[in-house]
């Protein structure tokens, strides 16, 4: 089975609360991290997936507007989450995330 990656975005700004809700939905404990490159982010490691939620704007000091964001076409989204499905039922995992208020499914790749 080839890994499947789901991309989500959220307009919600409270990464701590959202990380807790994602962890509850996926049945894992989110791990808080702080990076000089990524800023504050959370990782989630489950038996069938790996995920990370982080800020969409990752270079606020950047003078060129489109270089400030990971996804410049979606500046409306404050937080971004990629989840790599490594096993299990991808649709069940997606359904669990889709139930979280404020999480917008963007694409699969």
Image: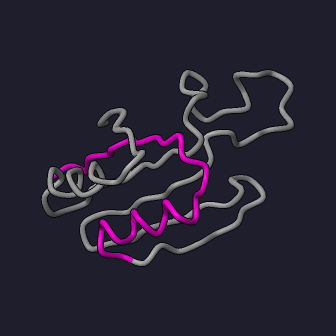
The residue lying toward the viewer, choosing from 26 and 51, is: 26
Q: Name which residue lies at 42% across and 45% down.
A: 102
Q: Position of residue 11 (x, y in %)?
A: 53, 40
Which residue occupies the extreme bottom position in the image? 29
Report which quarter residue 108 is drawn in: top left
How many marks are shown on the rendered structure? 0
Report which quarter residue 92 is drawn in: bottom left
Report which quarter residue 86 is drawn in: bottom left
- What segment is highlighted magenta in the picture? 1-28
Q: Is residue 45 left or right of residue 94?
A: right
Q: Position of residue 16 (x, y in %)?
A: 58, 65
Q: Position of residue 84 (x, y in %)?
A: 34, 54
Q: Position of residue 36 (x, y in %)?
A: 78, 58
From this view, report whether residue 36 is shown above or below residue 24.
above
Q: Name which residue lies at 46% across and 69% down.
A: 20
- Residue 6 falls within the magenta-colored stretch: yes
């Amino acid at each position: 089975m080839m890994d499947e990656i789901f991309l989500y975005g959220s307009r919600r700004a409270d990464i701590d609360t959202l990380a807790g809700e994602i962890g509850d939905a996926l049945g894992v404990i989110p791990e808080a991290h702080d990076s000089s490159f990524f800023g504050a982010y959370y990782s989630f490691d489950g038996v069938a997936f790996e995920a990370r939620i982080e800020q969409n704007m990752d270079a606020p000091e950047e003078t060129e507007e489109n270089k400030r964001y990971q996804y410049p076409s979606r500046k409306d989204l404050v937080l971004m989450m990629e989840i790599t499905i490594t096993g299990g039922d991808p649709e069940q995992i997606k359904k669990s995330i889709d139930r979280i208020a404020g999480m917008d499914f963007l694409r699969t790749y």
